């Protein structure tokens, strides 16, 4: 029975350290399991590719249904870039460079990163919730007992759908953003249309900027899809478990995206 | 794949001295069970005593710590993944509450195994699915989604799905849980009828005494991970074992106590009174 | 949602996704105008490269003909050595002049090539002999002030500076 002596400073510190240690070890254990899971997805991906219908269906649910949020957000981000960019540039008489500012910001950073964050919240959480719910209602168990590997049938298609959708959504975001910047800068404020596009074309390099942006969004897609399917598959089969897993997906994905963005940017844009 | 062709006399499922534990918590100890061919067997006991674990061991989802689990002459836990999947194709399982795939219609749920494991053309699959649904009385509901079904209907669809490939062994995890009286007797009848029609063996894990004793051939009684009693339905009903007796006749107090362990209430009251004085 | 409707939407999604990638590549980036052909390597030495960076443009008559590929300091002569890749379509004479110019008033710096009259052309690996360094603003100002001080003090010092300012 707990009594007063259990709350001495020594015992409290002891408990704190024990919990901390347990927390760290359980996280590391979970990370190891997640890596094995990642490998398993690749091994079982044959079905997802041979029966591409499954993957197409998932591309619809992750990619197509995210279109609205991506397009609208891209437009607004581009418009804000146009406004803020013009405000700063015109102080140095360089408002002609607005196209450069908007396009480079979007293609290099904002496109991949913001689109990935939005994708994680909308599609990532949906994937986690779906898989978690299937686990809680024993559907995954039932599939296993019917001699169908649930990783091949349920997890892998969703994973690849996320990986395929992410670069496309990032490109759409950037394109919409540039259009938004154009709307505000050229149409509304009156920056010269010719120099808007020509300076942009001169400064945005295909290999350095655009390809790197695509690589970034591809990596983000891998990260988000991996975290989303793993959290769903590993969720506790209860209501609290699934909701906790969904939150974890959004939080962990967002942090991982930002960290990966830093690493990739440091690697890619070092020479500049 | 199969070690030696089992004879008709050999039981379909045989558990010998099976022990299982989750970490340090023992779940099953020294379990010995045989499921003869063509018979319906019930595993009864109160919740959390290891009944579902037994089904999982037979289905190969769990490995025993020691002992043997044999299905159709094969050692389940010694099979590789191909062998295991081959075995599972000949087993059907009905999960508690059905576990239907919620993103597919009733038709697609029943057709699932046929599409995954066979190369049958769609028209043939259509006929088979309709036959299975008809046998559970839900042929007209083939277009509905699982969310549109009542509990009893969902259970019946899951039953049709479990027998889609005419399995040799059908396992039921609490098939009677949460059903209205009509659905209860329907499910009970269907379990018996399908078992006899397919020439299969069935294992029912349940704590519904009334319905299961009507249809089963043999009963195993599990308490705290051990088999405390076994026998035919009549033998169990007449059993003098206290635990079995309490369970069958639904007595409030007996080996399973009414009061959760606590100090004597009289003592506690005396303390409070003297404390106040 | 039956299968064919889903297929349609996924097809549309992938199409506009790839379309926007194409838009970014062609309209936003410089894919259309970047040289994807053969190039050859040239070297030029400058006293001062100013703000020239790797990937800076090499222009002749205002047209981009190549890119700066590397910049380092010669440890013996203490001059800047600039390596560049020039589009193979364009050949320059052996007495070509390489200068470092600024695009606009505050823009980036690039190398401008003025062709001379020599009949022989530079080949891969050659060094451009005639170069002019970048204009360093501080030197310009101090030059101006020096001249002003000289004028004020009466002596007509016609010191045309060592750095010709070519616009």
Image (tube, rainbow, N blue to C red):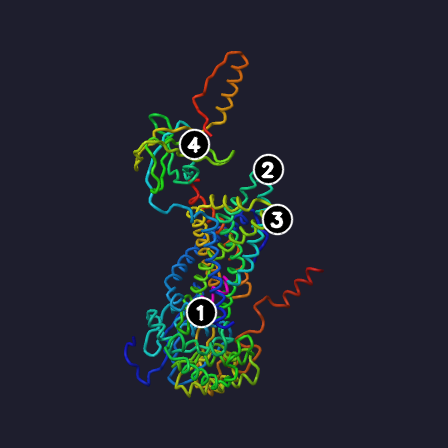
Please indicate, yes or no, whether residue A101 appears anywhere in the rendered image. Answer: no
x and y, in percent, of residue A168 in the image: 47, 57
Distance Cα–Cα, label 4 vs label 3: 38 Å
Which sits in the foreground, A217 or A187? A187
The residue under the point 39% across, 40% down is: C65
Do the residues indicated by labels 3 and 2 lie within the same chain of the protein?
Answer: yes
Q: Secondary structure at mark 1?
A: strand
x and y, in percent, of residue A122 in the image: 54, 59
Which sits in the foreground, A154 or A219? A219
Q: Give the extent of the magenta segment.
A: A56-63
Q: Nearer the viewer, mark 3 or mark 2?
A: 3
Q: Nearer the viewer, mark 1 or mark 4?
A: 4
**Dot 3 surroundings within 10 Å: few (below 14), some, or many (20 or more)?**
few
x and y, in percent, of residue B193 in the image: 45, 87
| Chain identity of mark 3 | A
* Residue A57 is inside the magenta segment: yes
Distance Cα–Cα, label 1 vs label 3: 73 Å
Task: Say above or below: B138 vs A156.
Answer: below
Do the residues indicated by labels 4 and 2 lie within the same chain of the protein?
Answer: no
The residue under the point 30% across, 84% down is: B7
Task: Say above or below: B6 vs A20.
Answer: below
Distance Cα–Cα, label 3 vs label 2: 18 Å
Distance Cα–Cα, label 1 vs label 2: 76 Å
Write down the residue under mark 4.
C100
Write down the residue under mark 2.
A91
């Amino acid at each position: 029975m707990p009594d007063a002596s259990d709350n001495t400073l020594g015992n409290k510190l002891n408990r704190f350290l024990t919990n901390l240690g347990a927390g760290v070890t359980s996280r590391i254990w979970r990370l190891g399991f997640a890596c094995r899971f990642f490998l398993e997805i690749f091994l079982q991906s044959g079905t997802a590719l041979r029966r591409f219908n499954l993957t197409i269906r998932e591309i619809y649910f992750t990619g197509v249904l995210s279109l609205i949020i991506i397009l609208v957000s891209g437009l607004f981000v581009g418009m804000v870039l146009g406004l803020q960019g013009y405000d700063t540039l015109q102080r140095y008489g360089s408002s002609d460079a607005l196209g450069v500012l908007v396009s480079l910001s979007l293609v290099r950073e904002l496109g991949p990163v913001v689109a990935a964050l939005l994708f994680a919240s909308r599609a990532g959480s949906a994937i986690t919730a779906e898989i978690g719910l299937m686990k809680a209602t024993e559907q995954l168990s039932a599939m296993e007992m019917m001699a169908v590997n649930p990783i091949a049938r349920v997890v892998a298609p969703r994973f690849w759908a996320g990986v395929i959708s992410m670069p496309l959504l990032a490109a759409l975001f950037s394109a919409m953003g540039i259009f938004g910047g154009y709307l505000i800068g050229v149409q509304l404020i009156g920056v010269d249309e010719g120099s808007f596009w020509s300076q942009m074309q001169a400064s945005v390099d295909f290999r350095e900027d655009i390809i790197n942006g695509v690589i970034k969004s591809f990596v983000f897609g891998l990260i988000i899809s991996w975290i989303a399917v793993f959290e769903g598959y590993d969720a506790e089969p209860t209501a609290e478990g699934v909701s906790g897993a969904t939150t974890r997906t959004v939080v962990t994905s967002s942090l991982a995206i930002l960290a990966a963005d830093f690493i990739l940017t440091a690697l890619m844009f070092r020479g500049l | 794949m199969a070690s030696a062709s089992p004879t008709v006399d050999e039981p379909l499922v045989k558990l010998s001295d099976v022990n299982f534990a989750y970490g340090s918590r023992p779940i099953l100890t020294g379990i010995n069970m045989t499921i003869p061919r063509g018979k319906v067997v019930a595993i009864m006991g109160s919740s959390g005593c290891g009944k579902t674990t037994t089904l999982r061991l037979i289905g190969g989802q769990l490995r025993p710590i020691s002992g043997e689990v044999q299905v159709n002459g094969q050692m389940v836990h010694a099979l590789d993944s191909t062998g295991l999947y081959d075995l599972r194709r000949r087993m059907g399982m009905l999960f508690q509450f059905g576990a239907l795939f919620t993103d597919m219609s009733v038709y697609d749920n029943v057709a699932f195994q046929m599409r995954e494991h066979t190369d049958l053309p769609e028209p043939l699959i259509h006929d088979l699915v309709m036959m299975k649904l008809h046998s559970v009385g839900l042929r007209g509901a083939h277009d509905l989604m699982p969310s549109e079904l009542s509990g009893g209907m969902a259970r019946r669809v899951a039953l049709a799905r479990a027998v889609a490939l005419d399995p040799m062994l059908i396992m039921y995890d609490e098939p009677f849980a949460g059903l209205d009286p009509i659905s209860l007797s329907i499910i009970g009848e269907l379990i018996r009828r399908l078992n006899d029609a397919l020439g299969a063996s069935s294992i029912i894990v349940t704590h519904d005494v009334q319905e299961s004793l009507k249809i089963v051939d043999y009963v195993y009684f599990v308490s705290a991970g051990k088999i405390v009693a076994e026998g035919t339905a009549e033998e169990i009903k007449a059993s003098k074992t206290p635990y079995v007796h309490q369970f069958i006749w639904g007595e409030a107090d007996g080996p399973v106590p009414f009061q959760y362990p606590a100090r004597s209430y009289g003592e506690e009251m005396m303390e409070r009174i003297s404390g106040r004085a | 949602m039956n299968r064919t409707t889903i297929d349609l939407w996924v097809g549309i999604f992938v199409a506009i996704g790839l379309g926007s990638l194409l838009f970014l590549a062609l309209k936003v980036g410089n894919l259309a105008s970047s040289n994807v052909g053969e190039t050859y390597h040239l070297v030029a030495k400058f006293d001062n490269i100013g703000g020239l960076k790797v990937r800076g443009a090499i222009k002749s008559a205002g047209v981009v003909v190549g890119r700066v590929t590397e910049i380092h300091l010669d440890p013996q002569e203490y001059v800047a050595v600039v390596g560049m890749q020039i589009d193979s379509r364009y050949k320059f004479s052996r007495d070509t002049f390489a200068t470092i110019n600024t695009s606009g008033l505050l823009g980036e710096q690039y190398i401008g090539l003025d062709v001379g009259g020599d009949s022989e052309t530079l080949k891969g690996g050659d060094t451009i002999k005639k170069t002019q360094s970048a204009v360093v603003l501080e030197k310009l100002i101090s030059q101006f002030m020096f001249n002003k001080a000289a004028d004020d003090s009466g002596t007509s010092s016609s010191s045309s500076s060592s750095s010709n300012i070519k616009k």
